[in-house]
Amino acid sequence: MTLHTPEFSQKIHGPDQPLLKVEGLTKRYGSRIGCADVSFDLYPGEVLGIVGESGSGKSTLLSCLAGHQRADLGRIAYDGRDVLAMSETDRRRLSRTDWAYVHQNPRDGLRMGVSAGGNVGERLMAVGARHYGQIRGKAVDWLGRVEIAADRVDDRPSAFSGGMQQRLQIARNLVTSPRLVFMDEPTGGLDVSVQARLLDLLRGLVRDLGLSVIIVTHDLAVVRLLAHRLMVMKSGRVVEQGLTDQVLDDPQHAYTQLLVSSVLQV
Amino acid sequence: MSDLGSQGDYTFAYLDEQTKRMIRRAILKGIAIPGYQVPFASREMPMPYGWGTGGVQVTAACLTPEDRLKVIDQGADDTTNAVSIRRFFQRTAGVAVTEATTEATVIQTRHRIPETPLREGQVLVYQVPIPEPLRFLEPRETETRKMHELEEYGLMHVKLYEDIARHGQIATSYAYPVKIEGRYVMDPSPIPKFDNPKLSGNPAIQLFGAGREQRIYALPPWTEAVSLDFEDHPFTASKAPHDCDLCGARDSYLDEVITDDAGRRMFVCSDTDFCAGRRAKGHTGRLGDPA
Ligand SMILES: Nc1ncnc2c1ncn2[C@@H]1O[C@H](COP(=O)(O)OP(=O)(O)OP(=O)(O)O)[C@@H](O)[C@H]1O
Ligand SMILES: [Mg+2]
C-alpha cells in the first residue's frame, strides 16, 4: 500500500508545485460542447470550487478530470504524471488510492447491497488489506469520523437517511487517505439543515487531512465555506477564476455578477 | 434422433465437427490461460440448461471412441441427471462407461470432485451454472471483464467480509472463489469448499463449461488454486463432523440423509463409488453391512 500524505507530497515537490495541472481540456458530445479549453492549477491542500448554471459543463469537466470520461483535447498532469497517457491499470489504481470521487447521488457511489462496513472497507481490500479485524476496525473508526454510530456498521445503506448515506460515501472515499478528492454536488438533494451539518463535517475533514479538493456546486454558500479558489463556468467555458472572496465580492464577468446577485436576493 | 446412435465419425458425440473444433479451440485457449473465462458459441443441446449443457458440450468435444466415461451428480452415479447424461453419450458416442473413478478417462461432474485422487491423463469436466465469481456484487458484465483484465479483485474480499460480518465466519460453503496461479479469480462451480484443495495441484485436466452463460475455462494439470480468505479468518475445507455411516470413512464429504418419519438421520459419503469401494474392501460404518 502506498499512501501519500500531503506532507509527503510537499516534501518531494515543495508547495509551489501544483498537484494537478490542467491545460486546454475539451470534451464534446457530438457537436455539442461539454466543456472547452479549461485550464487551471490545483495546489496541495487547496480547495477549488466550480460553479455555473445547469448545463455549463461542471460535471463533464469533473468526470474528465477523474478519468470517468475521456477528454478530446488537452492535458492533465497529476503529481507530474501525464494522466491521459497513463495505462488504464495505472489510472484505475490511482483512482483507488490517491483519488476519490464523491457523487451527488450516494446511490451512485455506494454499494447498496453491501453493509456500511463493507462499503468503507472496499477500498482497503482493493489495495490489498487482508486482515478482517483491522479492516473492520478502520471502518468503524471512519464511521465515527463521519458521525455514524459504530452499531450501524453492519447495516446496509438502504437503511440510512440521505444525509447518512452521503456521509457514508465520504467515509468510503477517504478511508485510504486520498490526496485529491472530486465532489459533484455533494450537498445537493439534501435538506438545508442536513446540508449545513455535512458542510461542517466536510470542512473539518478537508482541513484535518489536508486534502486537495475540486468541488462542483451551484450553491454559493458551499463555495464560501469550503473553497479557497473559485472557477465560474458558462456554456462549457471558464469565464472567471480567482480567490473565492475576490470573485464573490467583486465579480468581473456579467454572468458571475448575476450569479452573485441572485444569491443575495434569496 | 435415430442417427444419433450411429458410429459414423461426423456425428460422433452429437456435435458436428465444426462445433467441436470451435469448442476445442476455446478449451485450448482456456488451458493456455488458466482460470480465464473464454467465451464460446454454446449450442442448443437436447436437454434443459439446468442439466449442464455447458459440461455436456465440453465432454462431447473431448470424447474419443477409446474413452471411458463416468458421470456424477453431487457425487452419485445413479441420479436422474447423471444417468441421462451417461446414456446420452452411450447413444451418441458409443463410448464405454464406468462408475469407477480409477477406470474413467473422462469424468463429467456436477457439484463434486471425486474422493479418489485423479491421475495424469484423466479429464474432469465440471458443469457450471454461473461462471462469473464477481457477479454477486457487480452485475455489469463490461465491468467484471475489466476487473479481471486489470486484476481488480478487492470485491471478492468484500463478499467474504460481508460473510464474516453477518455470520461471524466465512459462510460461503460452496462455489468458494479461488485465485489461479496468482492471476485470475475463478468460480470453481458449486462444489463444496471441502473440495477446493483438490482443485490445486491436481494431475488431471480440469475443464469448466457454462452453457447458458457461454463460457469455458480450464485448469491444466498441476495448476495452483488458492482459496481466498483473510489472515485472521483463514480458509478451512470443512465437512460435517461425522464419519460415513456406511463405510466409516472419516475424511470424505458427507450427505445428510433423513432415514424415517421420526427424523432419524444418517451421514453417508456423497461419492457413491468411493463409499462402495471402501465397503467392498470390508470397511463398515455405524449402520453399514460390508457389501
Ligand atoms: N452524456 C452526454 N451526452 C450528450 N451531451 C451531454 C452528456 N452529458 C452532458 N451533456 C451536455 O453537456 C453540457 C454540459 O453538461 P454537464 O452535465 O457537464 O453540466 P453541469 O454543469 O454539470 O449541469 P448541472 O448543474 O445541471 O449538473 C450540457 O449541454 C449537456 O446537455
Ligand atoms: Mg452536473
Image: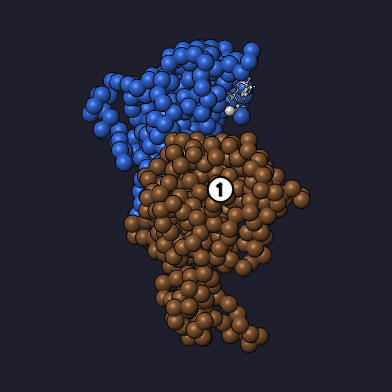
Chain colours: A blue, B brown
Q: Amino acid at mark 1?
A: Thr
Which residue bears the numbered disc 1? B64
Badge 1: residue crowd in 10 Å (few <14, some 14–19, many ≥20): some
Residue in the image at 51% along x and 74% along y: B276
| Residue B221 percent location from the top left of the image | 40, 49
Q: Quadrant of ligand 1?
A: top right
Between A5 and B41, the residue placed more toward the observer is B41
- Label 1 CB-ligand 1 distance < 8 A: no
Question: Which type of secondary structure does the marked residue at label 1 adopt?
Answer: loop
Q: Is residue B11 left or right of residue B281?
A: right
Residue drawn where x is 40% and y is 59% of the image: B197
User: Is residue A18 placed above or below B142 in the rendered structure?
Assistant: above
The answer to whether one can see residue A201 in this image is no
Instruction: Name the residue at 54% across, 57% down.
Output: B68
**Which is nearer the eye, B225 or A155?**
B225
Determine if residue B70 is in view: yes
| The quarter of the displayed image where residue B18 is located | top right
